[in-house]
Image (tube, coloured by chain):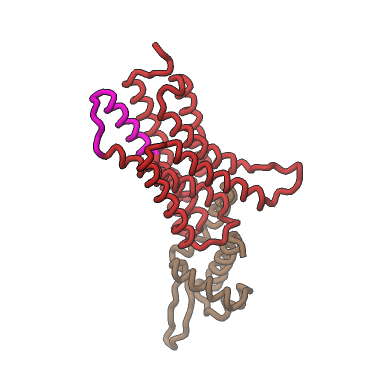
Chain colours: A red, B brown
Amino acid sequence: MNPYILPVKEFFAIEIIYFLIIAALCLAIFLRTREIYKLTGHRSIGFFRNIFLYFTIGYFFRFLHLAIIIAKMNTGLVPLFHRFNFIFIGYFSTLAVFNICLATLAKKIKFSDIQIIIWTQTIAIVSSIILFMTKSLGFIVLIQMTIFIVTLIYSLVTSKRPTLSSKLFSSNSITYGMLFMFWVISVILFNRRMFTMNMRIVLYIISILVFVSIFIRVHKRLKYVQER
Amino acid sequence: MSKRGKLEIIYTMLIIIREHDNSIKPTPLLRYTNISSQSFSEYYNELLNKELIREEFDNKKRKYVTLTDKGFEYIEKYKMILGFIEEFEL
């Protein structure tokens, strides 16, 4: 058996399990932080929650895209909405990436909520329209990497960690970076011939572990809130 | 003022109200909070909008401020909220 081409059933099973675990973790984080967000209205908590809401939807449309590819392989038919799926993948994943950046920079940026909404929505909508027209997932990865790299540079320039002994990136920056990286990898993994089955499974497991670690940290911090 | 500072000021205002048997006039609240009257006005309105406090009037139509259930909840969970914000550097 060619290790790069997975049997359709196994491929679909792996993808559905991966999607369900990621969606469950993202929704759990989103719902667990609802109470403190309602109580404080703290803007950064809102950005933090949005990361997981938008990733839930983004990963859903990613899964749908793969399901369509599988249906196409089996039946030769492509559903009419196939192309529209690109719009949703582009739109929601770009918003998720924006919220990662906003959660990282919330203390440093002075923009009002309205300004943030206008900018993020405009870029997300334009990106998804271009993705719809070009059908190039590489394009959306490029846009999202640009957003992420600009944030990284801005974060480094405005960093209050001037000493050589201090860490260049905090553990949270690394966590947010990994969330972004695994989203990009999950898009690259659309190409069934790029990774072997084993490599794909390893990447999915590491990706799940990142989400699990965030969920555990949220759960530990908010345990008391939930128990009351 | 930083966001952390904002959460602390809100916490301080709520604590002051609670320590005055959950009933205090706005002017002494301003004095105890020890911030400018302009800042106080902004925070005061924010607390009202977030339903952390409410205004009540006595027989002589004097205004008093009291905590709502949500206000008590905020005090109770303040340290946890700060812990969460620090954990994720939000």
Q: Magenta span: helix, strand or loop, mainly? A: helix
Instruction: Identify the residue at image location x=36%, y=23%.
Output: A11
- Residue A169 or A142: which is nearer the viewer? A142
Q: Please say if A173 is above or below B36.
A: above
Q: Residue furthest top?
A: A1
Give the side of residue A119 with respect to residue A158, left or right. left
Q: Quarter-wise, where is residue A62 in the image?
A: top left
Does the segment drawn in magenta span residue A68? yes
Task: Point out residue A172 in the picture as x, y percentages from the top left corner.
Answer: 59, 43
Give the side of residue A8 with respect to residue B15, left or right. left
Give the side of residue B10 with respect to residue A168, left or right. left
Q: Residue furthest front?
A: A134
Task: Point out residue A51 in the picture as x, y percentages from the top left corner.
Answer: 46, 46
Q: Please say if A5 is above or below B90.
A: above
Instruction: Identify the residue at image location x=66%, y=50%.
Output: A157
- Residue A107 or B28: which is nearer the viewer? A107
Residue A228 shows up from this direction: no
Instruction: Identify the residue at image location x=50%, y=44%.
Output: A218
Task: Point out residue A96 in the picture as x, y percentages from the top left corner.
Answer: 45, 46
- Residue B57 or A45: which is nearer the viewer? A45
Does the segment drawn in magenta span residue A5? no
Q: Residue furthest right?
A: A164
Task: Point out residue B62 in the picture as x, y percentages from the top left corner.
Answer: 47, 85
- Residue A45 or A105: which is nearer the viewer? A105
Q: Quadrant of the N terminus of chain A?
A: top left
The segment highlighted magenta reads A59-80
Q: Quarter-wise, where is residue A135 in the image?
A: top left
